[in-house]
Image (tube, rainbow, N blue to C red):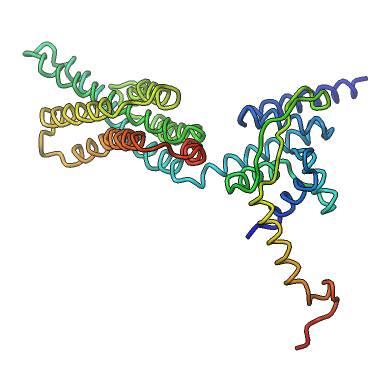
Amino acid sequence: MLGEFEYLLITAAASLADAAYGAAIRQEIEDATQKSCAIGAIYTTVDRLEAKGLLRTWMGEATPQRGGRAKRMVEVTPAGMKAAKEFYLAVERVSRDASWGPSGARRPV
Amino acid sequence: MGAKRSEEAGVKVAWRLSEWASRLLEPAEREAVLGDLTEAGRGPLLSFVEVFDLVLRRQAGHWKNWRPWVAAFGISVPTSFLFMGDSVALCAGFVKLAGDATGGNIAPGIMILALKALVLTGWSWTCGYLVGDVSGRTLWCSILAYGSPCLFCLSRFRIESLSRSSLLLFVFPLAVGIWHGLRGPRVGSRMAVCAASIITLLAVISEVCGPGGTGNACSWIGSLVLTCPAWFLAIASLAVTKESAKPETSLLEREQHESI
């Protein structure tokens, strides 16, 4: 099962599609969580997910905005999409009866 | 004016620190991270903190593997003390021989000491090669593990007839071994077995002909410990030769093996 941060990263990358790379993924996660995210956490997690076969990365093109430095592009593999979906469904199932869940009601004791 | 200048100087220093810290990363990752920080418009100090954070995470990641632990604490620390002991014994032997030079024939004594010097060189080189090969990315820690006992013993060295540098005869062959382990071509299996056999034979001869003869158990144990890395290298190179004869392993498996 994915970890919480791994899920955030995979989902951010999937949402960004062709524009998924380090800085963009970080911005996406920071916007979603409303908390700052270390670039170190992003890259170590990307490596871990790539080793598990859930992501694929390659060096992209350099741009002037980046001081002429290349980006590390990220793409979610089919296995990564499956893992993210499983995590999402598990969270949905376990949150069903929580007070903050979709039903908003507690299970009777 | 003065405040602006010192602020600019501070910004320059912070950027330099970021560039310096990023050199500890892989080239591709350095490029990506510095590019991301530039794009995000992070200030120089924050950039340095972020880069340093990633460097620490990468270094910590290496220590999940057994290799750096073995290199630093299994090889470097114990062999450092043993090498220093052998270096001092070798120097003391030469000094004693020089003192006895007015006496009879010193040729056998010189031959035995030359043999011990060769054995020490062989031991140092093989340990250095093993440390360089096994723990390339945590080499700084292995070097620290070699250096700390040296500094400790240098500060407590009290033999008046010898210089403090007599502790460090092993350093040059060790450094050459580390360089070869890190950058040089892999030692072939035949060469490794041959080297291990020669080192073992020379070590046995130097122990038998040495002052303790066959009775000095501590000296024999020390020699055995110092000969182990040479045999480990021989066995490892035989295993690599056997592996390379098999069908190609996956890129991921090869990268995982090479990652430390």
Q: Does residue B222 sit above or below B199 in this rendering?
A: below
Residue lying farthest left?
B104
Residue at screen point 15% across, 16% down:
B110
Residue at screen point 72% across, 50% down:
A10
Res. A40 image quadrant: top right
Residue B16: x percent and y percent? 72, 24
Residue B260 located left or right of residue B226: right
Residue B43 located left or right of residue B192: right
The one nearer the camera, B259 or A85, is: A85
Residue lying farthest top?
B102
Residue B243: x percent and y percent? 35, 37
Residue B145: x percent and y percent? 44, 36
The one nearer the camera, A42 or A72, is: A72
Res. B43 image quadrant: top right
Q: Does residue B36 sit above or below A10 in this rendering?
A: above
Residue B145 located left or right of residue A97: left
The one nearer the camera, B181 or B53, is: B181
Residue at screen point 67% across, 26% down:
B20
Residue B160: x percent and y percent? 30, 24
